[in-house]
Amino acid sequence: MRTPLRLGLFVGLALMGTQAPTVAVQLSVPSQALSKDEGPRAMRMLLTMQANRPYGKGNYGTLSEILALVPPVQVDATIIDEQTASYRGYTIRMTRSADRKHFELALVPAGGTCAASWFSNEHNVIYSGQAIGCPAQ
């Protein structure tokens, strides 16, 4: 009876030992630039928080308020100023009207590269585009 218990304990410890380095490696890998699918996904998450309007009926939040509600984006975002954050090789810019009734949201490549960009506003339609003169992707 004691042998199976020892064997189970040994196997359990061995499995735990093999998993720990994998987790440590995953946590230390820096975030990569956004893929073609991740940009629209980030936009949808940000727009969903604005659409839920936790700031009162007819009011929209600031970029930092919205980022706080979207942990998958917030973890890789760095706030630059009230309207701007850097995010995985891109710039997020959200401008909001003084009466908090309208906003515009853009996710554009940092440094003016020819990568895809995404845009939206309080109508929650996401538009994608690429700078004129860039090769088609």
Image: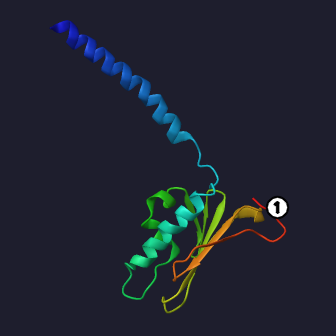
Q: Visible in this render: residue 105?
A: no
Position of residue 3 in the picture relative to residue 103 (left or right) = left
Depth order, front residue of 4/66? 4
**Residue 126 point in image, percent of width and height:** 58, 73
Q: Count the numbered circles shown.
A: 1
Q: Quadrant of residue 131?
A: bottom right
Give the x, y percent position of residue 24. 48, 35
Residue 13, compared with residue 123, is above or below; it is: above
The image shows residue 48, relative to residue 101, as above or below, that is above
In front: 86, or 43? Answer: 43
- What residue occupies the far right of the structure in this picture? 133
Q: Residue 67: give x, y in percent of width and height.
A: 48, 67
Q: Residue furthest left?
A: 1
Label 1, residues with CA under 10 Å away: few <14, some 14-19, many ≥20: few
Q: Residue sitting at 31 percent across and 15 percent down?
A: 10
- Quarter of the image for residue 84 reads bottom right
